[in-house]
Every structure is written in C-alpha cells, then in structure tokens.
Image (spheres, rainbow, N blue to C red):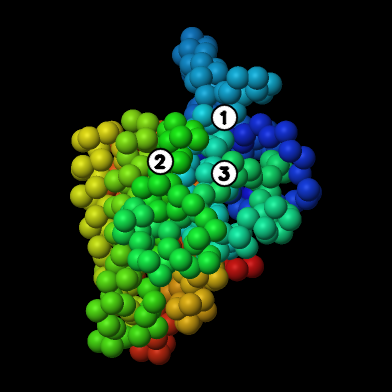
C-alpha cells in the first residue's frame, strides 16, 4: 500500500537493528526517509522558492539557498547521509507510556506505532485479564505483521506492565479481585504501583497516552442504565485518565504531552451508545480542559484529546452497531473514505511532538470531518438535492 506523503511534515524513523520480517507495510503512516526523495524535494522547492522561470536577483537567490541549507541541516539527525526536507516529527530520545493496549487492532496500537516510527521508546500498560494473551501473542510473533513500520523495521515494545486503571492503589482493590486468579499471578498493577514501577525501571517518561474505555452496560439506553453501570463507565473511561495523570505527572519531563481518546457522542446524540458512555466522554473532554490548566501550570505538560471516528476494532464491536456507524460516516462525512487507525496515530504523534508545543486543552477531531455535519445527507429527504459524491475512480 502506498504511503501517504506530505511535503510539509514527515515522521523520522528510528534506527532499528531488527530486520524486517515482511517486505511490505500495511501502515498509512506519513512517509518518511529518503525514498522518493526527488519527488518530495521537488515539491518542497516548489513551495519554498520562486519558479525558475521568474527572474530574481542572484544575490537574493543565493541568500535564500543558504538559508534553506541551514534549516535542513538543523533538522537532520546525526549520522544521516542525506538531509530530510520538511518539518520532522522527531521523538527520538522520548519515552511514551500507552495505557490500554491489549491487541493490535485498536487506536492505542496505532498510536504506539506512529510514536515508534517517530523514534520514541514504547512502554505499554495492558489490562490484567488480557495480559497473558497479549504477551504470548507478542512473543510468538502473531503481531509481527502489524508491527512493521514504514521503514520495514519492527516496532519494539520495551516493557509491558499489567495495569487495571480502575484502581488507584492496592487499598482500593476489593478482596474478591485480589484473590482472583487472573490478578493474583500479577503484581504492581494499580495506577500508583505501575507509575512507581516505571519510575524505578526508567526514571521518567515524556508522553502519556490514555486509550481506555469500558461501559459494562453500553448496550442499554441511558434510561435503563443502573447507577453502578453508569459510575463504572465514568470510572473506567474518564476518571482513569485523571488518575493516570495524577500518578504519572511527577515522573513526566517538563514539556511532555498527554493524549486521550474521546468520541462525538460526548456532544451529539448517538442512539445506541448507552450505559453512561456518552456522559463519560463528556467528562473526559471537560477534564481535558481543566487538566491542561493544572498540569500546564504545575509541570509544563500539555493535555489534549482526540475525538476519533468509528473504527472496526475488537473493543468497538461490543457496542453492537459499529458497522452501521462506519457506513453512516462513509455516506455523510465531508471526506468519503473509511477512517484508518493510522490516521489517528499520526495525529497523536503530531500532538506529542514539539510541532504542537502551543496546543493544549484541545479536542482534535480525526473523523473525516463528520463532526462538522449538521444533518445526515443520505436521508431520503435530501434525494432531490444535487449533493456531490466522492470521486472514487
């Protein structure tokens, strides 16, 4: 699959010593490296310089060329034989902790890949009941095809931690959970303990990603949702972000970034997205703004959330109508294409990078523009309107 290219922004690849197990990549992560350099360089020149057919003084042209060489030299990594044109998303030397990855099929995994492609070291927190399956699949190579980065190397996960973000510390854990066989075999899996383990193992992190959501009664209408179901959705899907930031903030390097994932149901009615999940997403977005102020003032940490469009992930299938949501988006969004997880991953890499150094407290929509629509244009009431369709040829 052809990589998406942009003359203005590229992801810098880490230097990996692990050989690729596949000769191709399914990823649509923004193209980086020096393949197709001639094409990218031509586009960059066309944007940066006046046309060669236009007349301008040699003196001005000479100064401009010198300036351009200086900029490229500044963004090129050490040891690069050829300069990289454009603005790089360079996260080399940064360490990211991503909470909520349990397979290779969701947004959390895609974010990990984009951060890794930009050079970041990846740490993962996995829900305890899913930990054994995830580690076994990773060890046996079942995720190898999904681990392929744009340069052909494999994404490396430095450490996988057991994590249940519903519990802040061991004192909060009910006895029946402590004695549960799936939990008793693990250790240090509450938010506080995981943060302490990461500090002991690595000292600090630069990027914190919250890719967690759970609503035990998500298939129930809000009017039929129990108090326990509602509170469980808010606890797992929104307060867990507050808890993560609270415990990881002391070990985050100033200038770092945190990212969570939200959904348009936080502000619009999505029938079928029940169990208090719409309320949980609303709380998450409100908390994003407050935490941006508090974390920004206390520790110079940026806090943003990505409102992602529908994805056919394993977790989303629990909602029961994810295919209908994807079809609806295809028909009604300004961009008539299926959203890929990598597009959300690339947005996260940008938000975690110095290129987004002034962006905080924001809800960033990555949904093909569906959030901007006021009506569903596929409705029969619009059948007489000349509504353009995407050219898919």
What's the residue at 66%, 51% (across, down)?
147
User: Which SS class for mark 3?
Assistant: strand
Q: How far apart are labels 1 and 2 at the CA level?
A: 40 Å
Q: Is residue 138 left or right of residue 389?
A: right
- Observer-side mark, 3 or 2, equals 2
- Observer-side mark, 1 or 3, equals 3
Q: Are marks 1 and 3 in contact (CB under 8 Å)?
A: no
In the rendered structure, which disc, 3 or 2, sits on the residue that comes first in sequence? 3
Residue 191 on image: x %, y %: 38, 51
Residue 299 on image: x %, y %: 27, 33
In the figure, 300 relative to 278: above or below? above
Q: Which mark is residue 85?
A: 1
What's the residue at 69%, 21% (across, down)?
81
Q: Which mark is residue 196?
A: 2
Task: Say which of 336 and 319 sits in front.
Answer: 319
Identify the residue under disc 3.
159
């Amino acid at each position: 699959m052809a990589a998406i290219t942009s003359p203005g922004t590229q992801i810098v690849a880490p230097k990996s010593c692990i050989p690729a197990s596949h000769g191709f990549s399914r990823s649509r992560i923004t193209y980086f490296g020096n393949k197709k350099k001639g094409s990218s360089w031509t586009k960059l020149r066309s944007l940066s310089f006046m046309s060669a057919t236009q007349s301008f003084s040699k003196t001005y042209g000479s100064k401009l060329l010198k300036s351009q060489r200086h900029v490229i030299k500044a963004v090129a990594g050490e040891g690069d034989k050829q300069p990289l044109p454009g603005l790089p998303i360079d996260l080399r030397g940064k360490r990211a902790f991503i909470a909520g990855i349990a397979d290779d099929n969701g947004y959390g995994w895609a974010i990990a890949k984009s951060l890794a492609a930009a050079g970041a070291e990846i740490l993962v927190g996995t829900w305890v009941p899913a930990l054994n399956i995830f580690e076994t699949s990773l060890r046996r190579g079942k995720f190898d095809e999904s681990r392929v980065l744009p340069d052909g190397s494999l994404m490396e996960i430095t450490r996988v931690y057991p994590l249940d973000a519903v519990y802040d510390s061991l004192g909060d854990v009910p006895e029946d959970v402590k004695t549960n066989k799936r939990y008793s075999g693990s250790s240090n899996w509450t938010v506080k303990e995981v943060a302490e383990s990461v500090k002991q193992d690595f000292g600090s992190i630069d990027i914190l990603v919250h890719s967690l959501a759970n609503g035990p009664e998500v298939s129930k209408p809000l009017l039929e949702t129990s108090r326990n179901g509602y509170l469980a959705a808010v606890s797992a899907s929104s307060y867990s972000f507050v808890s993560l930031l609270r415990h990881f903030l002391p070990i985050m390097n100033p200038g770092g970034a945190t990212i969570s994932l939200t959904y348009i149901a936080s502000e619009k009615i999505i029938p079928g997205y029940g169990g208090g999940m719409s309320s949980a997403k609303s709380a998450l977005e409100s908390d994003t703004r407050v935490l941006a102020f508090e974390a920004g003032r206390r520790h110079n940490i940026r806090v943003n959330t990505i409102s992602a469009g529908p994805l056919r992930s394993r977790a989303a299938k629990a909602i029961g109508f994810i295919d209908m949501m994807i079809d609806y988006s295809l028909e009604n969004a300004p961009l008539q294409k299926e959203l890929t997880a990598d597009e959300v991953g690339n947005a996260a890499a940008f938000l975690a990078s110095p290129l987004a150094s002034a962006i905080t407290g924001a809800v960033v929509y990555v949904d093909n523009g569906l959030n901007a629509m006021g009506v569903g244009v596929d409705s029969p009431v619009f059948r007489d309107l000349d509504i353009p369709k995407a050219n898919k040829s």
